[in-house]
Image (cartoon, rainbow, N blue to C red):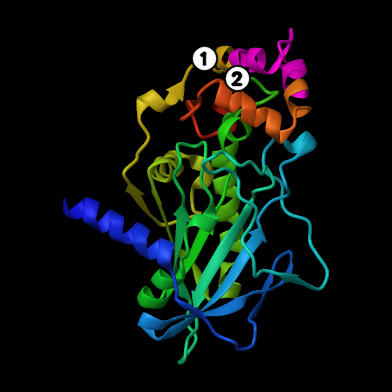
Amino acid sequence: MAAARDTALLAWILFLGGTALVATEQPEAETKYGRVRGYPFTVDTAERTVNVFLGLPFAKPPLGSLRFSEPQPPEPWEGVRDATSYPPIKEKVPLQVSEDCLYLNVYTPVSTGKQEKLPVLVWIHGGGLVFGAASSYDGSAIAAFDNVVVVTIQYRLGIAGYFSTGDEHARGNWGYLDQVAALRWIQENIMHFGGDPGSVTIFGESAGGISVSALVLSPLAKGLFHKAISESGTVTQGLFTDQPKEDAQKIAAASGCEKSSSAAMVECLRGKTEEELLQITLKMDMTALQVCNDTSPENCKQ
């Protein structure tokens, strides 16, 4: 009961966040890819201001030829990028799709004393690996009350996030690879937001908790975080598939992409619109997805 109450309280705090915007100078920060401008947000009950940066890209949009591919570093930009609005919503009920979803949000408390590098909490949302978005969670309150930097991340979901042919043409686990890419971005950039890259805790609920435990097991995430909290979800055997090719053929059949080779199947699916992928997801009643049996993409083979 206590654990359930604590989990509910955490979700409530994340959802509510702060309570009032304050009209002060907009904060700016430098990243590896360019400068960003956020906004200050006052959490009244904590009597503290948090600098908020929304919609920071940690990878290129996974569109076109990058669908069913490993995330690639974002393109650098000139000038100052506006970071005052949430990133595109990946999927939520009813499943509203935006494959252009590889963004994260940063909440950093304003210090009135000596500047110090703060611990970093990275939130991974749930949603059955099919829906969910970073914009559903506001990290302002946790940042203000606990004096930590909070980061909320997004990742590919549904077919776009976990489709695998079981061979080199679509190894799978794209959503997990997105999470690793976000953690790499944090290691490279969080110090510019007052965070300590040597003190990163990942935490998540439901499918986010499953993601946390998958990252704990994955060699790809080694050294990218230091503590982990899985809430109401861990990796279990039932989540995995040892027959990705058969599962891929079912998706291909539902989408009109039945081909004689994996390469042709993937090429056909890359030509589908986001709406068509959504309809395939709904047609197959995919409320949860099986994923390859290893979070290292080279091992997702038959």
Span of residues in magenta: 248-267
Query: Taking 80 as reference, is 176 left or right?
Result: left
Residue 147 among those drawn in magenta: no
- The numbered dot on residue 108 is none
Q: Is residue 124 left or right of residue 83?
A: left
Looking at the image, is 205 positioned above or below residue 253?
below
Identify the amino acid type marked 2: Gly
Q: Quadrant of residue 106?
A: bottom right
Residue sitting nearer the eye, 112 or 55: 55
Give the residue furthest to the left.
Answer: 1
- For residue 37, what is the image quadrant? bottom right
With 84 as the anchor, is 138 left or right in this view? left
Q: Which residue is mark 2?
A: 166
Main SS category, magenta section: helix
* Residue located beneath label 1 in the image: 243
User: Does the stretch in magenta take in 249?
Assistant: yes
Measuring 59% from the left and 13% from the top, which residue is drawn there? Answer: 250
